[in-house]
Structures are given as C-alpha cells and as structure tokens.
Image (spheres, rainbow, N blue to C red):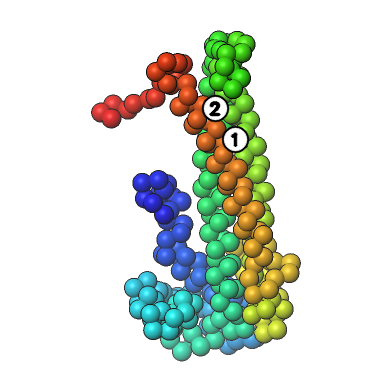
Amino acid sequence: MIPRYTRPEVGQIFEPQNKFAIWLEIETLAAEAMEQQGTIPKGVAKAVRERGKFDIARIDEIEREVKHDVIAFLTNLAEHVGEEARFVHQGMTSSDVGDTAFAYQLTQAADALMIGVKAVAAALKKRAVEHKDTLCIGRSHGIHGEPTTFGLKLLGHCQAFERAVERLQTARKEIAICKLSGAVGNYANIDPFVESYVAEKMGLVPEDVATQVIPRDRHAMFYATLGVIASSLENLAVEIRHLQRTELREAEEYFAPGQ
C-alpha cells in the first residue's frame, strides 16, 4: 500500500505483523477445539497460547528455503512452542488459515472504513442543513438550469454515503467467513466442530460449502462494494473541483495554517 494515500489504521491491518498474529490466533483456537474433542493431547493449546510467538524475518528466511508461507510460519512457531507444536494444524490445509485470516482482515478493514463513511455522511448532513437556504445555480450537463440550494446538492451526496453505510454492512457480513474444512472442503481430516468453534470465537460464520478456499465471489462482492463507495467519493470530489474553478468560485479549498 502507498503510505501517502493510506490511512494508518487501515494500512496496519494488512501488515505482516497483524496477518501472522491472526494466523497464530486461528491455530491456537483450533488447538483448543481439538483438545475438547480429544483429537490432540491436553496442554497443547495452553503451550501455544503461552509460548507461541513468531519472528517475521525468521519466517521470511525459512520461506526462502521451503517455498511455502504457512510451512514457514508453522516452523517458526514450533521453534518457540517446542514439542507440543507437532500437534498444531492437524487435519488443516494452508487455506484454512490463510483464507480465514484474510476474511478477518477484511472485516477489520470494513470496520475502519465504516467509521470514515459515517463521518463523511454526518459532515455532509450538517453542511446540508447549514446551507438549506443558500441559493446557487442548478446545472444540467454543466449548463445553467434553474436556481437551487447548495444544501440540496449536499443532501444528495449525503444520501449516497448513507446508502454506502448499508452496502458496506452487507459486504462485511458476506465476507465475515471462517473456513476450516480441510484440503478440499469436505472435513475429511477435521471435525466441523473445530470450524464452528473458531468461527464463534472470532466473530465469523462457517462457510456453508467450500472447496480448498472460501468462494471468491464473496471477495468480488466486497471489492465491488468498495468500488461503488469510491465512485461516490469521486462524484463528490469532482463536484467540489468544478465549483472551485476560477471562473465559478462557488466553493473554495480549505488551507490549514502554515500549509
């Protein structure tokens, strides 16, 4: 991500530190569930919870040799946990960890974006009320049409962002998915209880029918929703840019002190 155009609270979600922390939590929760079932010995989850750590540089070093990110992570995890680590990840496939973690990251991102979208909607509503009687010219294809108010124009944008809130909530729900069903999604070597347990603990929902991965139409809809919201931002930005042109001067860019 480009730092200049990335909000810090969103950028950190996709940093390796957060990704591997989620991977570790998934493996720990899965171990807890397997212990309850008697699939693995008692004490494994406790060992992972207490001694489980990771070193990003070390993971990268291992991956250069083994050519596999999850194996590299698990190898580094075992270096910290010890003998109990041999029972971690039992019956799971790499995408069980990677896909579930990525879905969780997208819910984190959606929560952060939701704050921003709601703030934009609130700001537009405030200004719309403030300027409900501020007369301005209404345009059709850029040509003078009829008088209107600046407040009404802002209210239209406000409504777009209020719809964006609803769309983002729906997109978040659709991507908040947990998938721990094994190599081809049929629970051949892992009990569905493990998936349900991890999902509940992480605020996710088990995938109804999976393959090796979470169905990608879920991701496509999430990204499509972001695209629609971005188009609303672009619409507002173009309007502001148009109104502050020298020959119009109906709006003016704000400059902070010392800018």
Outermost residue, left side: 258
Q: Is residue 13 above or below residue 131?
A: below
Mark 2: amino acid: Leu
Q: Quadrant of the C terminus?
A: top left
Q: Is residue 229 above or below residue 141?
A: below
Q: Residues within 10 Å of mark 1 (few under 14, many from 20)?
A: many
- Could you say which is closer to the camera, residue 234 or residue 88? 234
71 on left or right of 213: left
Residue 139 position in % (x across, y down):
58, 17
Q: Residues within 10 Å of mark 2 (few under 14, many from 20)?
A: many
Residue 30 position in % (x across, y down):
59, 75
Residue bearing the label numbered 2? 124
Q: Is residue 116 above or below residue 1?
A: above
CB under 8 Å between discs 2 and 1: yes
Identity of the residue drawn at 49% across and 31% down? 237
Identity of the residue drawn at 46% across and 89% down? 83
- Could you say which is closer to the camera, residue 65 or residue 59? 65
Q: Quadrant of residue 220?
A: bottom right
Viewer can see residue 34 = no
Residue bearing the label numbered 1? 161
Label 2 SS: helix
Mark 1: amino acid: Phe
Residue 1 position in % (x across, y down):
41, 54
Identity of the residue drawn at 65% across and 44% down? 167
Find the distance from the CA under tag 2 to the CA under tag 1. Answer: 9 Å
- Could you say which is closer to the camera, residue 203 or residue 237? 237
Residue 47 position in % (x across, y down):
48, 80
Q: Quadrant of residue 206?
A: bottom right
